[in-house]
Every structure is written in C-alpha cells, then in structure tokens.
Amino acid sequence: MKTNLARIQSDLETLSKFNSSPGQGLTRFSLTPEDRQAREYLREELIKLNLEIYEDAAGTLFGRKAGTEDHLPPIMIGSHFDSVKNGGNFDGPAGVFMGLEIMRVLVENNIKTKYPIEFVAMIEEEGGRFGGGVFGSRAMVGLVDYAQLQRNKDADDISMAQAFEDFGFDPKKIDTAKRNPEDIRAFIELHIEQGPVLESKKKDVGIVDFIVGIMELKIVLSGRPDHAGTTPMDMRADALSVAAKVIAEIDSYPPLENNGTVATVGVLNIQPGAANIVPGEVSFTIDIRSKDYSSIQNVKKKILSSLDAQVAKSAVTAEVIELLDVKPVEMDPTIIDLFKKHAEKCGFSYEMMMSGAGHDAMIMGAITPVGLIFVPSKDGRSHCPEEWTDYDDLQKGIELILEAIIELGDEVK
Ligand SMILES: [Zn+2]
C-alpha cells in the first residue's frame, strides 16, 4: 500500500490529545483552545507538504495541491475535526486524516493530476457547542448568514459571531465561504460507520450509495387526568392507552418497504406521570429514515392512519407536529463506480450501504458530486469513549480513496 499505517495511527493519537475532557472521552468543541491546538497540528503537517494553506470564513481549513491545469475546480477530500461531548477519537478525524495522508502520498510520490486536490477540515459538524451542526459544509453551500451567527449561542451564552471574532475570524464575512457548483469538482469524505454492519459482515469498507432522508414527528395526545381508582374504564380519556396502541404497531411498517427503512420512538412523555392518575397528556417522537423518500411517506401515512383509528375509538384528541423533513441524498454514481473498481483492484471486500446518519457529504451534495466511504466501527459504537476503528481498517479506506482520487483527478504521467 502507498499509505503509511504508522503515520495514520500517530496522527489519530496526536489529535486525540487536544481534548477538554481527558479520561471521559474526547470533547473538542469548535473555536476553543482544543480546536486551536488541533488546527495548528494540521496546519504544520500541511506546511511540511508545501501546500497552499487557507481558511474560509466558517473556520474550515484547506490545503491545496495545484493541478497541472490549475484553472479546473478542485476535488475536495476530508471531514470534520470537532467532536460531540465525551465522544470518541475517530468520528471526524478518521476522514480528516484520510485527506492528510492522501496529500502526503501525492506529494511524496510526485503524483500529478490535472485537477487541483484540496484537503478540507471542517468544524461544528456535530453542533456540539452551538447546535445545528454540519456547519462548515452548510457555509460552503450558502446556508449560513451573519444573523444566524449572532443567534446561535453556546451554553455560556456566547454567540457564534462572538466566538469567531475572539478566535480571529471575521463573522461578518461568513457569506464569502459560499461556493458555487462550478467551484468544486467533487467532495469525497471518509467516515466511521457508527453502526455494526461492516464488522458483522466482515467487510473492509462500506461504499455509501445514499444518505438517508429523515422525517421527525412529534405526536401530542390530550385526554383527561382522572383518579386511577375511582374512574371506571369506560369513562376514561387515557392518552397513554391510545399512544401505546399506536406505538406498538410502528415497528411492523418499515420492514414492508424492504429497503432498510427504519422508524424509532425515542421520546415518550407521560403527564402528570403518577402511579395513581390516568395519563392526561402523552407526547412521543417518531424518527423515520430511509434512502427512499416515498418509503418515509408510506410509513408516516400508516402511522397517522393508525393514530386516527385509535383516536376515533377514544375520548382523546391528537396533534401531529412535523419537526424535520430532510430528503435522501444520492451519492454520485460515477464516484461509486470508481470506488467499486478500485476496491476490487486493491482486493478490499466492500458492502454497498446507506448512511443512516447525516454527514458533511450530505450537505455538499447540493452543489457538487459527492462520495462517501465507511470504515468499520468496533461493536458499532460511536459518540462514546469506546468508539474504535482498527488502524489497518482505516488505512484500507484511505488507500481506496487515494486510488479513486488519482483517477478522478486525471493523473498526468
Ligand atoms: Zn462525524
């Protein structure tokens, strides 16, 4: 392999030290001293490669290797280097070091491509400090403005605009981070799977074909809180009884779509919430995800019609609130084919999969062809201190993207 395993491991271990919660997983929020340390490390590594280094107004760090036809738009490779609170060392950095290691191999081996190649390291993908998330990519797509930076505040009531200013960026220039479709040839990301599929199927890499669409609903059922001992069963307006019947059916709908669609009730609130009171109000959330938007609609329709039927049989009323409606994003078929071809050439086993979580690639898909490679997560764990990917598994993902990039970038021999 052209990539260097020891170097990838050392990168990951070094970055993991820039952590505000040592001993309790990794916490590296955006625009903090830990962000500064990580950024400096990345910058120093890019300087060694003689790349053109710059930052955009959203705090994204770039390292550009010129193309032999340098007027062409660059292929961007990378991910994010912020983390959730008390998370792991791999979510984000695995993709950032994919970018860095590929730049090193290209420079060291004097590999020339017609298209420029740019290393990309973004912040606030997790939204850990300011909420929202996928910030660097949203800024590149033009979905962030100064008013939002003033509005978004951290737990200490510091606005994102203030934090950018304190860090040395000019938040009023946030609009300048916006790119147009003609400015980027492609965006390619590597990410840990954050699920158990690759490990359980013993596959080297995952080639993502879709990032799922997400529909999030909140259902509020209003009945009447009454005495649990003195109110006869046929005279109750029990909101939980209705909710339970609706919820009990939900897991039967997604398998009928036969395409990996999933639905989850993750929040259930019962009011007043006492053992001796009939539940007067119940609210619950439903999170539906699928690579097929019509499957999301089908599952939603079935849930709502079961809700209507149960409500009609009761003295309870229902309100449905739509919290989120994000359409699935398709990865670029040409890039998928490149990944397949080079996985076969490299002798890596692969699994075609959809991504059940959102990533920067999902946002970048609005302006440029995107590709996303997954590497296995031990026990499927993520967003926790136990998060782990074997370094040689990570190396295979990086090697695959390297080979694909050399072809996509149109190597000049
Ligand atoms: Zn991530």
Image: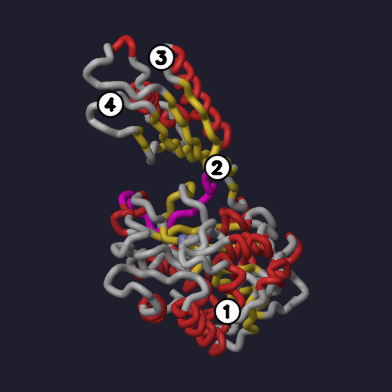
For label 4, the residue is: 277
As helix, strand or loop, the secondary structure at mark 2 comes to strand
Tell me the quadrant of the picture where the C terminus can be found: bottom right
Q: Earlier in the sequence, mark 1 or mark 3?
A: 1
Q: Earlier in the sequence, mark 3 or mark 2?
A: 3
Residues 147 and 386: in front is 147
Q: How far across and down, in percent of the image, does residue 181 sit?
A: 73, 60
For label 1, the residue is: 166
Q: Residues within 10 Å of mark 4 (few under 14, many from 20)?
A: some
- Amino acid beneath label 3: Ser
The circle drawn on residue 39 is: none
Distance, label 2 to label 1, CA atoms, is 33 Å
**Is there any visible trace of residue 179 in the rendered image?**
yes
> What stretch of residues is rendered in magenta?
200-212
For label 2, the residue is: 324
User: Which one is in front in this view, the residue at disc 2 or the one at disc 4?
Assistant: 4
As helix, strand or loop, the secondary structure at mark 4 comes to loop
- Amino acid beneath label 2: Leu
Residues 106 and 63: in front is 63
Distance, label 1 to label 4, CA atoms, is 52 Å
Q: Earlier in the sequence, mark 1 or mark 4?
A: 1
Say which quarter of the image contains residue 119. bottom right
